[in-house]
């Protein structure tokens, strides 16, 4: 009898548990959300601005209602709030999801970006990232992946006042470019431009390119030789090297080092205009080659000489 009562009791408990699971509503799952990490991508760059794509990755419950993610941008120097970009967080079937925020920033400032998740307008979690040196981000059309491997100078002529030097730069590139190079000789102590040359060169990847030219500078001075790379009217890169034509000498302690007299008149130069495209040579029509100027006059002189010679022989 007792065994039957126990069996009936166990059966009833089992039935009640099944019915409770099916018909009695269970406890609602708790909503939660927090930031795991933030990735930053550069979408585009121009001379003044950078377009960023902020990707905020989050751990979360499947159901999250009334939640938003913010990106508040502050000036890092003044702590002034510049922008507040907000986006609603979507429902998801995954415990790991992300939201993207598009932000455009000027390149002349440094920033502090605060990423914050809010639930029912109350902060839940946050991350802080600083953005610095945006001016180092270069537009694609202004990229110049060229490095200077070596430079040397060869004296090719000397007179009482000037020195003629051949300047040679050895460059290696990762891409092919058509570059206009500007070679400048600057007197080291005064920063006066002593001479300059423009050289057009096609730089090829996988090979060393030699850029060279001759400059003439006053002798007995030291110079800073600069090589500037220009493309599409923009200065993209500058390299520097020293040319010492008046190296210092070691003197005894009791002697006083004399100052070098700077003669400004030795640096007077006629300005060199920027190079312009060379016009194509003239081509005569129908394949005829035009006669050189003055050739008719030469024939006339020869003919007159022949006439005078014949008249003298008759006499």
Image (cartoon, grey):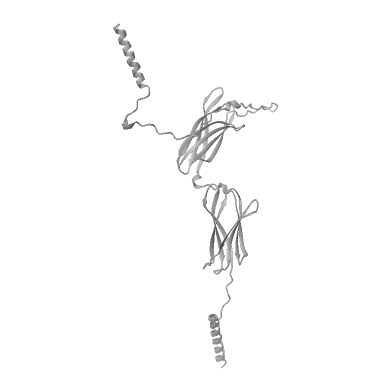
> Where in the figure is residue 48, as x and y percent of width and height?
55, 48
- Residue at x 54%, y 26% (from the top left corner): 163
The reply, left or right, for residue 49 in relation to residue 307 is right
Residue 265 position by quadrant: top right
- Residue at x 33%, y 32% (from the top left corner): 285
> Where in the figure is residue 44, as x and y percent of width and height?
51, 51
Which quadrant is home to the C terminus? top left
Residue 221 position by quadrant: top right
> Where in the figure is residue 168, as x and y percent of width and height?
50, 33
Residue 186 position by quadrant: top right
* 25 is higher (above) or lower (below) than 283: below
* 186 is higher (above) or lower (below) than 177: above
* 3 is higher (above) or lower (below) than 109: below
Which quadrant is home to the N terminus? bottom right
> Where in the figure is residue 247, as x and y percent of width and height?
60, 29
- Residue at x 34%, y 16% (from the top left corner): 302
Count of picture labels = 0
Give whichever of 1, 263 is nearer the camera: 263
* 11 is higher (above) or lower (below) than 114: below
The reply, left or right, for residue 289 in relation to residue 255 is left
Q: Residue furthest bottom?
A: 1
Q: Residue furthest right?
A: 254
Give whichever of 21, 124 is nearer the camera: 124
Q: Residue furthest top?
A: 315
């Amino acid at each position: 009898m007792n065994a039957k009562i126990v069996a009936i009791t166990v059966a009833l408990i089992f039935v009640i548990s099944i019915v409770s699971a099916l018909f009695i509503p269970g406890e609602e799952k708790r909503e939660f959300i927090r930031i795991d990490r933030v990735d930053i991508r550069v979408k585009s760059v121009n001379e003044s601005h950078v377009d960023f794509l902020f990707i905020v990755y989050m751990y979360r419950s499947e159901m999250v209602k009334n939640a938003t993610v913010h990106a508040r941008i502050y000036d890092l120097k003044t702590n002034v709030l510049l922008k507040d970009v907000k986006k609603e967080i979507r429902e998801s079937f995954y415990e790991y999801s992300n939201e993207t925020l598009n932000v455009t920033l000027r390149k002349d400032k440094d920033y502090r970006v605060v990423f914050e998740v809010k639930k029912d307008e109350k902060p839940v979690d946050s991350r802080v990232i600083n953005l610095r040196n945006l001016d180092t981000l270069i537009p694609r059309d202004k990229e110049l992946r060229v490095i200077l491997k070596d430079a040397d100078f060869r004296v090719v002529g000397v007179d009482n006042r000037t020195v003629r030097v051949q300047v040679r730069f050895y460059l290696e590139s990762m891409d092919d470019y058509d570059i206009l190079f500007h070679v400048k000789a600057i007197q080291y102590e005064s920063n006066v431009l002593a001479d300059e040359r423009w050289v057009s060169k096609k730089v090829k990847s996988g090979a060393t390119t030699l850029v060279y030219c001759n400059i003439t500078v006053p002798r007995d001075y030291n110079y800073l030789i600069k090589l500037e790379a220009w493309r599409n009217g923009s200065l993209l890169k500058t390299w520097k090297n020293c040319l010492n034509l008046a190296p210092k000498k070691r003197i005894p302690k009791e002697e006083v080092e004399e100052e070098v007299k700077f003669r400004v008149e030795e640096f007077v130069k006629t300005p060199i205009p920027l190079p312009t495209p060379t016009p194509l040579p003239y081509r005569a029509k129908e394949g005829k080659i035009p006669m050189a100027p003055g050739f008719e006059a030469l024939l006339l002189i020869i003919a007159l000489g022949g006439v005078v010679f014949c008249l003298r022989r008759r006499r």
